[in-house]
Image (spheres, helix red, strand yellow):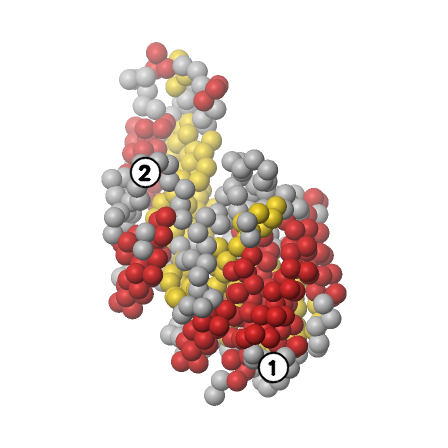
Amino acid sequence: MDAEKTRALVDPFWDEAILPALARYIEIPCQSQLFDPQWKANGHIARAVSLAAQWIAEQNLKGASIEIVEDEGRTPVLLLEVAGSGNDTVLLYGHLDKQPPMSGWEEGLGPWKPVFRDGKLYGRGGADDGYAIFAIVSAIKALQAQGAKHARLVALIECGEESGSPDLAYYVKLLANRIGTPGLVVCLDSGCGNYDQLWNTTSLRGMSAGELKVEILTEGVHSGSASGVVPSSFRIVRLLLDRLEDSSTGLLKPEWLRVNIPDHRQREAERTASVLGKNVFGEFPFVKGATPSSDDLVELLLRRTWRPTLSVTGQSGMPDVSQAGSVLRPKTSLVLSIRLPPTLAAEGVGKRMKELLESNPPYGARVTFDVEKAAAGWEAPATEPWLVKSLDNSSHAFFGKPACAYGEGGTIPFMGMLGEKFPKAQFVITGVLGPKSNAHGPNEFLHIQTAKNVTACVAHILADFSART
């Protein structure tokens, strides 16, 4: 393929066809099923899938078929198949469900309000991950416009990724004959260390999450009377979290949550640190004077990608500060999210967490830990020479710099599933979630030029896969 022709096709197509459709998608509050239990009745997910399917149909891809597959009680998937030459298959992946809106959006911005500003498209879901299906179609159009040979292409777009992909294994099995055995998997739901080059994700952490609930009283009582006699539920929570985490370092204590970090991933982190420098932590909106958890850049990358970590992502049992009275509260609940090393099996972690937190409860309090979800991590297989060359060539062609590889701290359950199912496949896991793009938080944005560049890179990687020897 000719890089200049690809650029001349992809960039205007994004401006004229993709961005208007993506803006309409951002307006749809299609929250994932975990955050919108009434998703079916509300119809937002159906609207998002219908918008994407109709838009694809309007693009007149050669040899394409589109189908929305939805079985009773399950979120739908969008299946796009495009005929190709040869016997190879490429599986491309994205999702259309979104995280909740969150508060704290800047003035003039909002989760369901598409705003174009300074080369970015703001709004929930544009970068995570609504753009994916539009970029996939654009890459295919670039292939077809230049008459480039490509393998049979199958795009699978789900609507439950933000809830841990509970329906995806079912659909992969249901559609197994149509998916086939891919030799290459392309996922556009990951991040990028900067907006200056193509980034390929080589590992993803797993996750185990649940609700920790501590009850010490049957009802709230006057804090002046009870404090000092009744241990507060919050202090008991702190004691329990001390079993899990060293609060002075943030490192998790149980040996069964750790793995040995491979030497080649250590070297990869060292290279990434040399490329990003202080941008390893500079993308995060620290308050003035705040610092990251370590001053070692390589260690920060490893903590983000290969070490287990704890985040408290929700709570109940505490009134708003404006409503706080002199009351010793009867209970405290926290949602705990534990990120797991890529190669650690997620199965059984929830059970061990339950045993750790519920055994020998301090002061005889009623302690429960209810496991909510778990997802395995993933590590990429060794990258074949053709793909190393393709990633680097396409990055040079469309970013002007060499490609870079690193691990991501997030979780994409589908990748672990595919890695198990297709052990011989090569993987390109990339995306547009770079510095300050803030997926899941306020002010999420899509960096438009990066999206265009990634699209063009994907087109050339698909052509290179078909041309490999």
In this rendered view, identify the residue nearer to me: 241 or 287: 287
Nearer the observer, 414 or 142? 142
Marker disc for residue 101: none
Residue 247 horizontal/vertical position (percent): 27, 39
Residue 214 image position (x, y, % from top left): 39, 32
Considering the image in quadrants, where does the N terminus appear? bottom right
Give the quadrant of residue 226.
Answer: top left
Q: What percent of the width, then of the height, locates residue 6?
A: 59, 73
- Disc 2 is placed on an element classified as loop
Residue 148 — which label?
A: 1
The amino acid beneath tag 2 is Ala
Question: Outermost residue, top direction?
Answer: 225
**Residue 259: percent from left, percent from top:** 29, 59
Which residue is located at x 38 percent, y 74 percent? 382
State how many labels appear: 2
Residue at 64% across / 67% down in the picture?
137
Which residue carries the number 2 mark?
A: 290
Choose top left, top right, bottom left or bottom right for residue 210. Answer: top left
Q: Is residue 393 left or right of residue 282?
A: right
- Ranked by sequence position, the earlier of labels 2 and 1 is 1
Q: What secondary structure is marked by label 1?
A: loop
Give the answer, above or below, for where 352 lies relative to 288.
below
Asked if residue 418 is positioned above or below residue 220 in the image, the reply reads: below
Residue drawn at point x = 71 percent, y = 45 percent: 41
Say whether residue 94 is left or right of residue 261: right
- Assess disc 2: are there few (<14), some (14-19) or many (≥20) residues with their C-alpha within 10 Å of its C-alpha: few
Residue at position x 62%, y 73% in the image: 142
